[in-house]
Image (cartoon, rainbow, N blue to C red):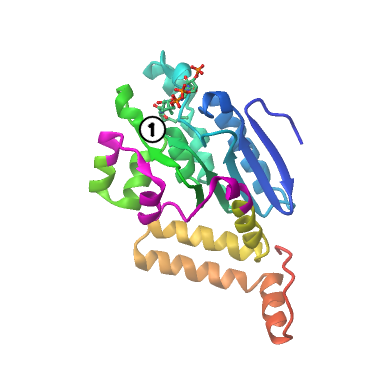
Amino acid sequence: MREYAFIETKVEDYIGIIELNRPKQLNALNRQMIKEIVQVMESYDQDDTVRVILLKGKGRAFSAGADIDEMSNDDPIRLELLNQFQDWDRLSLIKKPIIGAVQGFVLGGGFELALSCDVLIAAEGAEFSFPEVNLGVMPGAGGTQRLTKLVGRTLALEWIWSAKRIQVEEAQSHGFVNRIVSGELLEEEALKFAKMIAEKPPLAIRLIKDSVNKAIDYSLYEGMQYERKNFYLLFSSEDQKEGMNAFVEKRKPKFQGK
Ligand code: CO8
């Protein structure tokens, strides 16, 4: 596995792990770090030994947001030419499930990164916030869009205007944290969840993600047509035969991802 400057990676038991590795800066996301995350996610997406991606952060915070030192002297033309958000757009194209394990501060771009995950397991005490307004700016990597779709317009406005720190219990009650666990158990619980998904048929898992994501953009009718095609498609997989034969033969299925 290649060495990266700002992340650590490893693959074990079909789980491709990415760990943000700038703990002294509370995993503040510089541009190189985002490039590394996206590059590894894309390589995991093509890697047969990876079925689930697990994203976590080293140290006391998942991420305190974009690297303020790096962007403090930016100007619009430089931002346009850098086109850094292209990397964020590529994150939305990852087909395999992404499990986020978060603790401590989950702020700004770090919150946006967490919202790009499919499932979030959070440690007790985790805090979520968009503090950009206090820097004279606003979320730029999907925060206003993703949060609004999750919690509705009025709460999103209140939270983003005020930079309110949302405690993990409130985050769970609004549906963007799946599970709260103690800090010591965060990694273990996230891995347990990832392994449970990794044992399921990978093609079905992939097309479920694809279909559920369409529910956000499509009308109900269009979404149901889309779902149907994916449902039909799975009947051409070996795993569909294996899953149904195993049921009939009263044994545990062994899924191959084909
Ligand atoms: N950028 C750069 N450095 C940071 C950041 C950051 N976002 N957050 C923390 N650090 C650094 C601190 O400067 C400090 O470094 P040093 O030890 O060299 O002084 C170190 O991390 C530890 O931080 P603190 O000493 O401040 O720790 P505290 O526990 O006292 O405070 C806080 C923790 C509350 C998280 C505080 O550090 C803080 O307020 N950080 C800034 C949070 C913030 O405003 N984030 C939003 C950034 S803007 C953004 O995310 C825009 C996203 C849109 C584009 C996405 C592109 C990636």
Residue beneath label 1, please?
Answer: 140
Depth check: 183 or 118 in front?
A: 183
Residue 162 falls within the magenta-colored stretch: yes
Res 8 quadrant in image: top right
Tell me if the residue at label 1 has its CB under 8 Å from ligand 1. Answer: yes
- Residue 233 left/right relative to 254: left
Name the quarter where the C terminus is drawn: bottom right
Circle 1: residue type = Gly
**Residue plotted at (72% across, 68% down):** 255
Residue situated furthest right in the rendering: 1
Where residue 85 appears, as percent x and y from the top left, is 46, 32
Where residue 10 appears, as percent x and y from the top left, is 72, 41
Res 237 quadrant in image: bottom right
Q: Is residue 252 visible?
A: yes
Q: Residues within 10 Å of mark 1 (few under 14, many from 20)?
A: some
Mark 1: secondary structure: loop
**Residue plotted at (73% across, 46% down):** 11
Q: Which residues are magenta?
A: 159-188
Where residue 183 appears, as percent x and y from the top left, is 55, 45
Depth check: 144 or 215 in front?
A: 144
- Residue 168 left/right relative to 183: left
Q: Is residue 32 visible?
A: no
Depth check: 96 or 27 in front?
A: 27
Q: Note whether 90 is above or below 190 in the view shown.
A: above
Name the quarter where the N terminus is drawn: top right
Figure quadrant, ligand 1? top left
**Residue plotted at (66% across, 25% down):** 5
Depth check: 175 or 96 in front?
A: 175
**Residue plotted at (46% across, 30% down):** 64
